[in-house]
Amino acid sequence: MKKQILTLMLLAAAVSLHADELPLLGNVFNRQHTSLNGEWNYIVDVQETGYYGYRLDKLRNGFFINAKPQRPEDLVEYDFDKADKMTIPSDWNTRDERLFFYEGTVWFKRSFTHHKQPGHRALLYFGAVNYEAVVYVNGREVGTHVGGFTPFNYDVTNLLRDGENFVIVKVDNKRRAENVPTLIFDWWNYGGITRDVLLVDVPETYIQNYKLSLDRTNRKQINFSLQLNSKTAGQAVTVSIPELKIKQTFTTDADGHVGATLKVKNLQLWSPDNPKLYNVELTLANETLTDAIGFRTIETRGKQLLLNGEPIFLRGISMHEEKPNGGGRANGTEDARKLLTWVKELGCNFVRLAHYPHNEHMVREAERQGILVWSEIPVYWTIAWTNEQTAANAAGQLTAMIHRDQNRANVIIWSIANETPHSQQRDAFLSRLAGKARELDDTRLISMAMEVTSASNYHNRLQDNMNQYVDIISFNQYIGWYRDVNDAAKMTWEVPYDKPVIVSEFGGGAKAGMHGETNQRWTEEFQENLYRENTAMLDKIEGLAGTTPWILKDFRSPRRLLNGVQDYYNRKGLVSDGGEKKKAFYVLQEWYKSKK
């Protein structure tokens, strides 16, 4: 009996053995890696039988074991190899019509071949999984990640076998009050492994992450920092930028860190008109990393926004991470190029990637095309402000967002929230996030989408205690849609802060192809007129430095229920989900021509 108990205890320990989530691996796509994208088997587990339904003496029935009957009488009530397949990355809502509204657990399994190399380590990287992911390799738990839009990685070297292996991921997209975002949000809760999965090959000691940025006060100096995966002193690290004739070697300190400056001459600054990227090479013993990095400055001076020391107006548009035609989660360069084609046609030099960090392909493609970026975490509407676990979650998502994109020249704004109702608890929560963002990265600006809370007749006055923690005052307003229809011309605005202003949302809905009078809701003419009146109104705002109207294209939302018009789509897009440009598209396009 004692022997049996000991055996069960050892089995339980083996199942729960896991590695801690590592700090984020930077520049993952330019490292040696094996893609695990492709066909994954999946099992829909409504009651989480594969996780909670097994007993200690029936470990074979936990789905993560990937058990197979060894004898005719063995009872195993699942079989991944006979289950349906889904292409990863994707979302189950659009890949399986049975799961269109589904919120719960789905198990995914992928087999792969791996050959171990002495002196190398294997890191399992996920671009994003929505929302909670429990990861297993060869039946052993690796770890749990919470948060649907940020990357994460684990060291799985000791869990891999030489030859055939399998990875299983329990994905759960149920909404919870303590989550970030919380229970209610105005976009589709796409579940699944929504971004790339990679098995990354690194040496025992490797470059974990690095940052190169132009000094804010000295354009002849690039600030360089680098962190190894371990506290290893005396490691030689060489940074090379051939076009700038830079090649210097530094030595890591006791923390495995390098902090240095690089003197530079004749530097071409990155800008929307000249999105110049320099080839950068970092070398550490048995590892060489390459990247393409641009250099620019972004700052404010009173109510002016300055890029490379010159005033700039941000001709922007807001975007959700949805595919350009047909809905579903966007997740690759092809999707990014199509969406950004519409952005460029609008005459934009700026996008607000709302309301969460978008995939890395989008950020990098925007950088190549000369499009500035506002990047945001999903602290959306009413969050559990006093819950420390929620605060840690938000801070973790902020950290991952910054660490992934800290070398992208086009990212100029970290946004910490959207439309959050005012309270002391909210101010305390958000001020901590603002402080965290500044601690992690002082080379970019901080903002958030506020709400207008004071209105008297036709006079609007912005009042928000968070004004002292942000660099840019941004707010959402829907004159002509949610309030004051046809009264935009009478509106005046007061922003009592000596900082630049971005109107981060305005607009209204229209169903593509529906026509009528300018006062008829849902028609293209109504939306067209709304944009005409709003753009004329916005021209009167002192210190207006940019706008990001809501939104580039129609997107799915369970909150939008009007049959025959919305049909579970938010119709505020300037482009329909089928790619049709609405009449308001051309109003904004023409207005932006006047802003050059």
Image (cartoon, helix red, strand yellow):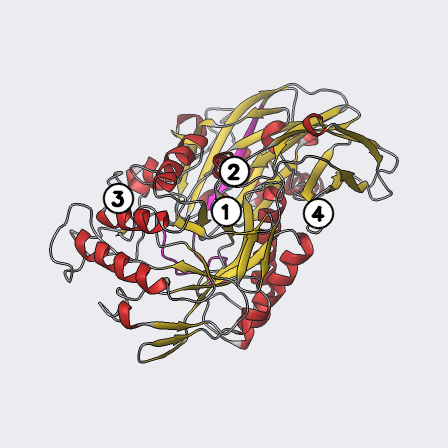
Give the amino acid at mark 3.
Ser
Q: Is residue 79 visible?
A: no
Q: Pointer 2 and pointer 1: residues touching (CB < 8 Å)? A: yes
Give the amino acid at mark 2.
Glu
Inspect the magenta stretch and tell me whether residue 186 lies in it. Answer: yes
Of label 4 and label 2, which has the lower sequence position? 4
Estimate the spatial distance between the alpha carbons at disc 1 and disc 3, rounded to whole Å.
Answer: 23 Å
Estimate the spatial distance between the alpha carbons at disc 1 and disc 4, rounded to whole Å.
Answer: 20 Å
Residue at screen point 62% across, 65% down: 432
Estimate the spatial distance between the alpha carbons at disc 2 and disc 1, rounded to whole Å.
Answer: 8 Å
Q: Pointer 4 and pointer 2: residues touching (CB < 8 Å)? A: no
Q: Quadrant of residue 199?
A: top right
The numbered disc on residue 215 is 4
Helix, strand or loop: magenta stretch: loop
Q: Is residue 504 visible?
A: yes
The residue beneath circle 1 is 373
Q: Would you say 342 lies left or right of 420 here?
A: left
Give the amino acid at mark 4.
Asp
Residue at screen point 55% across, 69% down: 498
The numbered disc on residue 213 is none
* Image location (x, y in percent) of residue 301: 59, 61
The residue beneath circle 3 is 576
Residue at screen point 50% across, 58% down: 179
Q: Nearer the viewer, mark 1 or mark 4?
A: 4
* Image location (x, y in percent) of residue 122: 67, 29
Q: Pointer 1 and pointer 4: residues touching (CB < 8 Å)? A: no
The numbered disc on residue 367 is 2
